[in-house]
Image: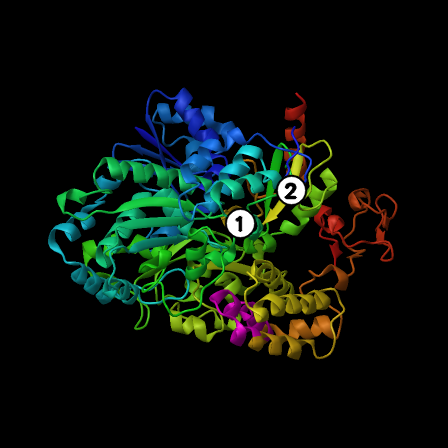
């Protein structure tokens, strides 16, 4: 990887991947969030050098690009694991024991909210509400939703995913 | 025969995807279709079977019974023991029968991915009628007659907003749908978009015609991927059929529609913050006036309504404003959808006419509290609302009456709590939420919520001090006065209502260092009831710190010095011998 000159970070990502997105949106006013969403989909997170690149291509000041990116909870600035666990801590989930579920996940994986396991398999993010309140407590792993969780059920799900990935 | 599998997010989370796949792959005797959310989330996955004009509903269908289930259907053996076991019970039928469905009228009935299904159910008739026969002013008049008010929370009269946007002179106006359903515990907007997206589109188009907008935007939460997929599909279908785009239905009226996915910020539910976000900025509220109806999106007149508000519009135009106004109370007209969750027996979506009581919804429709526990409170209005106690269960559902309790109607989240829920912890939970979600623009909200959270954390950790309650109350008033937008102005409500109705719990935490609900770990000790303990050793094996000792078949004891209060022993005990 080349060295990125703007931000002095150690990496330079492949901007060609983002080129079609920038071509479509760079000059459309109000599209910064959309561009950031696409960038995160492409790179898995928002690397600093990519944010600089977006700033350059759109003509929006780097400080503002970072300001917008850090405002919204959807955006992350570190790579995530193969399985991204979004654990719901909305009101209904809270009342029905989401805290216990969080403790179980943290214990099983040895990570905290916002971290990724050393093997790069799991990341945990606690979110406000996934809107599946009737099945609380709920979590979403990648695009799949799991409801009516208990500590044992969570352990089983994590074990199955780990086995699946090892196979 | 037609087999319809409920495929809302709740259904899919409960395993409906696998059930649909099974029927699709293995069934030749019936047509397989999907529908959205019927609202009986507690019974998902739900399968409807329509044969000879009779619809039978089967609940909690699991993947392992499918071969036998499917065989019985193929043989049309509806009296089969297995089918009977899974068929919808009478008490559950009542859950739906006691409702009046307008916004949700097609949810869980039609296929949300088919515009033909929607048209067959009478869809797009209201739009065609409006475009052919009515002036924008007449449309606004009908909405005024109906008494429809904003269903997002504030309850502002819809016609007034439409009229203000109509009166604003500009070449370009915008109609925006607020689908940034951020209140934890509310999911009616998600259900409407996932289950009946064309209803939203039709309502929005009527609104766009009324105010004179040629562009409509739906701002959807990023956490609702299925809703985005279904709405994208519906917009495409509507364009193909000429209901969206240039010269709609030959009327000369043109309007295009697009989706903007939000990026996760609760404050973007506030309309001016939402506009900032649409413009690609940090979602921070603007000072009003000017109101969005004068200067909104890109400084042009804009009208913003919530999903549920739009979901009522087509029905009102078809049935007349009087029909809608005939339901409800003097102050609040029509119906309201509630997301009934928490410690409730039958949780899901409930749409009822205004004027029913909280008791009707929670006990009559929702079946009361799970596991024979005692009702304690219902939280309404999410982080902007409050907790309503038992003695106010007969409060009538009406904007003013609910506000008088200190809670609000809100977007319709109803989280039911039982005796094991600690009200101080609930207040702490909401302040944790608002402190995180405060955009930071106003000092009182940014710092005030943080200070309140610190005090509440202190109280639940057993370090509460004399004067904390008064300090909280003072901070509440300061934040209410000093915040620019609804988030800050209402953030103290969960604290104020819990202090008002459950002051004794605060006092118990602060002065007696006890949590009456037995929830706050720092204030409880686990004990084993020697009379109930059978000495099965299960708890001792579960304890992560080895704090439980005892011989087999003899009562065990917990070493409170060692105990970390994780509660695993209580969960594992089969005899209910462990208590706090």
Which of B98 and B189 lies nearest the eye of the viewer? B189
In screen coordinates, is A144 left or right of B226? right
Please say if the residues under marks 2 and 1 sit with CB atoms less than 8 Å apart. Answer: no
Please give the chain letter of the residue carrying mark 2: A
In the rendered image, residue B97 lying in the magenta stretch gets the answer no
In screen coordinates, is B89 left or right of A111? left
The secondary structure making up most of the magenta span is helix
Residue under circle 2? A7
In the rendered view of the protein, which quadrant contains the N terminus of chain B? top left
Mark 2 residue element: loop
Can residue B270 be spotted in the picture?
A: no
Which of B172 and B246 lies nearest the eye of the viewer? B172
Residue furthest to the front in view is A5
In the rendered view of the protein, which quadrant contains the C terminus of chain B? bottom right
Residue under circle 1? A61
Residue furthest to the left in view is B133
Q: Position of residue A32 (x, y in %)?
A: 47, 46
Tell me the magenta residue range. Answer: B479-499
Mark 1 crowdedness (10 Å alpha carbons): few <14, some 14-19, many ≥20: few
In screen coordinates, is B556 left or right of B282? right
Is the residue B143 above or below the residue B392 in the image?
A: above
Please give the chain letter of the residue carrying mark 1: A
Q: Position of residue B205 (x, y in %)?
A: 25, 50
Mark 1 residue element: loop
In the rendered image, residue B483 lying in the magenta stretch gets the answer yes
Which of A66 and B269 lies nearest the eye of the viewer? A66
Q: Position of residue B431 (x, y in %)?
A: 60, 64
Can residue B427 be spotted in the picture?
A: yes
Q: Position of residue B303 (x, y in %)?
A: 32, 59
- How far is disc 2 from disc 1 in space, using C-alphas? 13 Å
């Amino acid at each position: 990887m080349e060295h990125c000159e703007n931000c002095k970070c150690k990496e330079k990502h492949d901007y060609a991947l983002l080129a079609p997105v920038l071509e479509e949106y760079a000059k459309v006013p109000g599209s910064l969030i959309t561009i950031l969403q696409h960038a995160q989909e492409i790179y898995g997170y928002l690397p600093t050098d990519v944010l600089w690149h977006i700033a350059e291509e759109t003509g929006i000041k780097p400080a503002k690009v970072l300001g917008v990116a850090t405002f919204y909870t959807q955006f992350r600035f570190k790579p995530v694991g193969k399985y991204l666990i979004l654990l719901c801590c909305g009101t209904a989930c809270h009342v029905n024991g989401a805290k216990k579920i969080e403790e179980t996940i943290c214990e099983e994986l040895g990570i905290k909210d916002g971290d990724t396991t050393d093997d790069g398999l799991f990341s945990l993010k606690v979110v406000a509400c996934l809107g599946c309140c009737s099945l609380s407590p709920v979590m979403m792993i990648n695009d799949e939703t799991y409801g009516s969780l208990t500590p044992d059920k969570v352990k089983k799900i994590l074990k199955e995913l780990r086995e699946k990935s090892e196979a | 025969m037609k087999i319809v599998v409920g495929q809302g997010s709740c259904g899919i989370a409960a395993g409906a995807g696998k059930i649909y796949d099974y029927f699709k792959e293995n069934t030749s005797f019936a047509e397989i279709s999907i529908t959205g959310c019927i609202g009986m989330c507690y019974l998902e996955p739900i399968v409807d079977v329509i044969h000879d004009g009779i619809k039978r509903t089967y609940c909690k269908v699991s993947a392992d019974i499918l071969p036998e289930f499917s065989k019985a259907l193929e043989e049309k053996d509806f009296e089969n023991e297995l089918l009977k076991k899974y068929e919808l019970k009478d008490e559950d039928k009542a859950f739906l029968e006691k409702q009046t469905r307008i916004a949700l009228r097609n949810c869980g009935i039609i296929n949300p991915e088919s515009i033909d299904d929607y048209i067959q159910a009478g869809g797009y008739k209201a739009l065609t009628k409006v475009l052919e026969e009515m002036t924008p002013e007449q449309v606004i008049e009908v909405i005024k007659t109906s008494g429809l008010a904003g269903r997002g929370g504030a309850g502002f009269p819809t016609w007034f907003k439409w009229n203000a946007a109509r009166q604003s002179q500009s070449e370009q106006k915008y109609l925006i749908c607020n689908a940034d359903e951020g209140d934890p515990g509310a999911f009616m907007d998600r259900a409407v978009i996932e289950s009946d997206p064309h209803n939203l589109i039709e309502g929005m188009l009527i609104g766009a015609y009324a105010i004179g907008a040629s562009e409509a935007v739906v701002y959807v939460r990023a956490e609702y991927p299925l809703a985005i997929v279904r709405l994208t599909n519906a917009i495409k279908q509507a364009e193909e059929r000429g209901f969206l785009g240039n010269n709609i239905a030959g009327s000369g009226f043109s309007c295009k529609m697009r989706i903007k996915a939000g990026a996760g910020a609760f404050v973007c539910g506030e309309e001016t913050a939402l506009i900032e976000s649409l413009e690609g900025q940090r979602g921070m509220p603007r000072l009003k006036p000017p109101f969005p109806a004068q200067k909104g999106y890109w400084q042009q007149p804009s009208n913003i309504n919530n999903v549920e508000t739009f979901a009522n519009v087509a029905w009102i135009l078809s049935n007349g404003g009087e029909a809608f106004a005939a339901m409800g109370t003097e102050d609040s007209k029509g119906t309201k959808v509630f997301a009934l969750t928490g410690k409730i027996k039958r949780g899901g979506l409930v749409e009822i006419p205004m004027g029913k009581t909280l008791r009707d919804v929670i006990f009559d429709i929702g079946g009361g509290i799970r596991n024979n526990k005692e009702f304690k409170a219902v939280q309404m209005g999410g982080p902007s609302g409050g907790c309503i106690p038992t003695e106010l269960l007969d409060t009538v559902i009406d904007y003013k009456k609910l506000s008088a309790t200190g809670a609000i109607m809100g977007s319709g989240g109803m989280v039911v709590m039982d005796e094991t829920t600690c009200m101080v912890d609930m207040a702490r939970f909401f302040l944790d939420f608002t402190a995180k979600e405060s955009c930071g623009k106003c000092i009182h909200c940014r710092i005030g919520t943080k200070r309140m959270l610190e005090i509440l954390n202190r109280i639940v950790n057993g370090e509460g001090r004399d004067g904390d309650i008064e300090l909280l109350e003072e901070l509440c008033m300061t934040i209410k006065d000093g915040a620019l937008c609804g988030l800050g102005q209402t953030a103290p409500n969960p604290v104020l209502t819990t202090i008002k109705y459950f002051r004794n719990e605060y006092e118990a935490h602060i002065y007696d260092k006890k949590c009456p609900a037995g929830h706050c770990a720092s204030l409880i000790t686990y004990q084993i009831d020697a009379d109930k303990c059978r000495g099965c050793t299960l708890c001792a094996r579960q304890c992560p710190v080895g704090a439980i000792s005892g011989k087999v078949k003899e009562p065990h004891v917990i070493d409170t010095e060692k105990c970390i209060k994780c509660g695993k022993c209580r969960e594992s005990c089969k005899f209910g011998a462990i208590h706090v």
